[in-house]
Image (cartoon, rainbow, N blue to C red):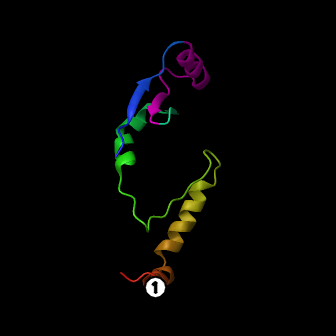
Amino acid sequence: MGRVSYDRIQGEEAEKLDDLFGMKDCLIEVNPGRVLLPPQYQEIGDKIVNMKVRTDDVWLVSYPRTGKFTELNKDFLEVFESEDYQKEVRVLFPR
């Protein structure tokens, strides 16, 4: 798969971001994609890019900081873990 690179943001851009978020080195540039993410992303970035995606994976996606993701996530997990759902899945997608 792809290789992830991480670059410190420097100069005036870095100063503006540090002032905005109230902390030094608050974001890094992640490539491919030229995305700004917290530096902690470096710990998991390669794993995410190289993870195996299966046809039966379920992706939960939400806008950041909407406040609804945690609630929706809990609701989906309850449905997926319910006995009725598991019976339906076995009927529709036998292994």
Find the magenta span and give its range: 12-32
In the image, residue 48 lies at what x, y percent? 39, 47
> Which residue is farthest front?
1
Q: Mark 1 belongs to which amino acid?
A: Lys
In the image, residue 95 lies at what x, y percent? 35, 81
What secondary structure is found at the residue carrying circle 1?
A: helix
Q: Residue at x 40, y 29 (%)?
A: 6
Q: Residue at x 45, y 87 (%)?
A: 91
Q: Quadrant of residue 75?
A: bottom right
- Taking 8 as reference, is 3 left or right? left
Q: Residue at x 62, y 48 (%)?
A: 63
Q: What residue is shown with label 1? A: 87
In the image, residue 59 lies at what x, y percent? 51, 59
- Taking 67 as reference, is 4 left or right? left
Q: Does 7 sit above or below residue 76?
A: above
Q: Does 53 sit above or below residue 83?
A: above
> In this figure, what is the number of numbered marks?
1
18 vs 32, nearest the viewer? 32
